Amino acid sequence: MNDDPTTDEAAIALAHSLLDAARSGDSSSLLPLIDQGAPVDLRDSSGNSPLMLAAYHGHAELVGELVARGADVDLANDRGQSPLAGAAFKGFTDVAQVLLEAEADPNLGTPSALETAKYFERAEIVTLIESRRK
């Protein structure tokens, strides 16, 4: 076990940089670190993963890249919100499309992505979700 506080500080700084890169859509900083072994489902103090942050901030291409690297499309944050619900809340239809193609469950979370899309009158996202029902 390493008790060196500088190692802990470096790990925390790296985690913050990963999450900031996801938030800002900086795939050129984020993806190489994940490819080198950084956890794709790393979570911040509110339970937000890089996928959640990328989805919430409308970075559809980055969302797709994170999904391709094994990100959990249904990993909810500490408030019970899924990445798909975050995209529905913000009205990012392109992000919702990527998540739905990756089999994100629109009925998970509190509120669910479907409930969120209906509440905020995101008709395109509601249509996307309902067109995928079997």
Image: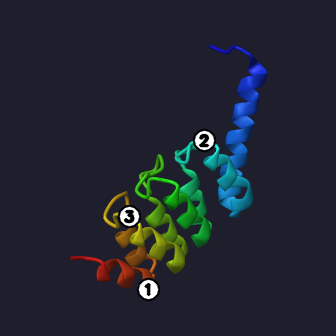
According to the picture, the residue beneath numbered tag 3 turns out to be: 104
Looking at the image, which residue sits at the far right? 6
Residue 11 screen position, x and y as percent: 70, 32
Mark 2 to mark 1: distance in Å?
36 Å
Task: Say above or below: 69 vs 85.
Answer: above
For the question of whether residue 49 can be seen, the reply is yes
According to the picture, the residue beneath numbered tag 2 turns out to be: 37
Which residue appears at 55% of the width and 72% of the height? Answer: 90
Query: Of the residues shown, which amino acid type is indicated by label 2?
Result: Gly
Q: Is 57 on the left or on the right of 94, as rendered?
A: right
* Residue 128, quarter of the rendered image: bottom left
Which residue appears at 42% of the width and 75% of the height? Answer: 117
Query: Of the residues shown, which amino acid type is indicated by label 1?
Result: Glu
According to the picture, the residue beneath numbered tag 1 turns out to be: 124
Label 3 residue SS: loop
Residue 19 screen position, x and y as percent: 66, 50
Residue 22 screen position, x and y as percent: 65, 57
Q: Are marks 2 and 1 in contact (CB under 8 Å)?
A: no
Comparing labels 2 and 3, the label whose residue is closer to the camera: 2
Label 2 residue SS: loop
